[in-house]
Structure formats: structure tokens, C-alpha cells
Amino acid sequence: MISFLIFSLFTFSLLANPPDTVLYAAQIYQAERSKLQNYKVRHIVVSKLESSSETYIEKRIQTGYFISPDKFFFLIKEKWINHQPVKVKKDEVEKSTKREIEWLSKRGIKEYKFSYIGGNEQVAKFKVQSPHIDRDWYNGEIWIHPSQYKILKIIREPSLLPVGYEKYTTELHFDTDLPFQEPYLSKLEAIFINERGEKTYVLVDASFTEYEFNIPLKTEK
């Protein structure tokens, strides 16, 4: 009888919306973000674009710098195009932005729908559904460690695909040993269709290593 009650309570907590596991994960994530000022990271990214007429492969080794809340830029160190080295300009920088994980933000917890879809002692998997059809709102899955309440994996796709795209899926893989929840690996798979109906397949694999958090950033601009 006791074991049945425990199982029933556990099941109810997973079926609630948002489930307790997601709520706890969001609380931990939001607390971390409030303490994160910046970081430096080693970034290796390989991009492959393949169509019926050509294949383009680019590899970069670069240093990434994040400055809270959303400033992100990369200092490119080495570059190859189709396996041939390319000279990199001194201080060649690529600027970008990086938002927090919207699903676990205060707004995300209120507006997205989370549904438990399975798991075990190592992972709890939740389907995430957007309340809006928009390129800035995402559907997908979030995998959370059931006792640490830290993110293990995110799979997402815009609820409204960008113009010309048949597919645009991103995966983020996380290391629970890091002091802040940042990915060690990201993957992008996309299919773009041009005006002539020709498809280009896009694959981007990026690794993130050697994180240094909350340090003086001499290269900050």
C-alpha cells in the first residue's frame, strides 16, 4: 500500500503542468543565471552544407566569450574550408547573441506545456509544446536528471519554421558537473529549399570545452 502511494505521488508530480521536476530544474537554472556574469570557452565547430551540385565543409577553432545577459562573440583562431587551411585575419571576430533557455525562464514555465514522456533513474524526459506558432517559440523535448534537476539534453525546433526551411532542429547536450549549465555539444540539422525546389542539407556540430566562468575578460569589446 505504501509503495503504491509513493508511486502515485511520483506519477502525479510528473503529470502536473508544469511537473515538479521541471519546476525544480527551472528554479536551479534561474538561480545559476543570476550569478553568471561571463565565461570563456574553447569552441570547435564543423559545418557541412550539401546539395546535389556541391558540398561545402568548414571547420573553425575559436575562443568564445559570453557576457551576461546575451552578448556572445568568437575570436577565430584557425579555419579550414573543404579541408584546406584558410588564413585568418588578426582579431577576426564573429559577434552573436545568446539567450537563456526560454523553456526554463519565468515566462517559459508559465506559458509552455510540459508533458512527461518517459525515463528512468538517470533521466526524466518531457515533451515541450509552444503556446504560439512563431519562429521565436520552440517545440521539442527537455531531458532532466531526476535527482539533480539539471538539464541533460534539449531537442528543439521552431514552432514556425524559417522561410525556405523544411527542417531546423537543434540538439544541446549538457554536462552536469559544470558549475553553470552550459552545453558541451550542440548539433544543428536543417534542410533548406531554394526557389527552384533544390534542397541543401545543413549539419553543424559544435563542441564546447575548457569553460572558465566569471573571470576578467581582457578581450571584452
Image (tube, rainbow, N blue to C red):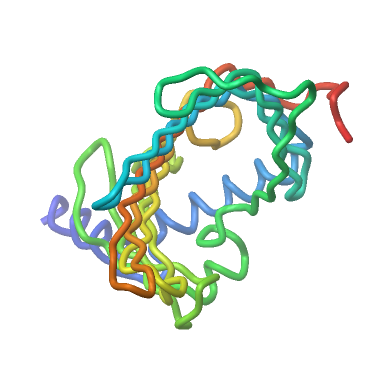
Residue ranking furthest to the front: 53
In this picture, is 191 found above or below 203? below
Residue 65, x across and y down, in percent: 72, 31
In the rendered image, the quadrant that contains the C terminus is top right
Q: Nearer the viewer, residue 175 or 65?
A: 65
Residue at x-position 32% and y-position 63%? 167
Residue 2 drawn at (x, y percent) = 16, 53
At horizontal 45% and vertical 40% (from top left) the residue drawn is 150
Among the 4 quarters of the image, the one containing residue 1: bottom left
Q: How many marks?
A: 0
Q: Which residue appears at 35% of the width and 44% of the height?
A: 203
Q: Nearer the viewer, residue 104 or 135?
A: 135
Relative to 56, residue 137 above or below: below
Vertically, is 72 above or below 157?
A: above
Left-right relation of 218 to 104: right
Q: Is residue 213 left or right of residue 16?
A: right
Using residue 211 as the reference point, say whether residue 95 is left or right of it.
right
The residue sitting at 27% across, 62% down in the picture is: 116
**Image quadrant in which you'd find residue 193:** bottom left
Residue 192 at x, y = what percent?
A: 36, 63
Viewer-closest of 2 and 177 = 177
Q: Nearer the viewer, residue 52 or 126?
A: 52
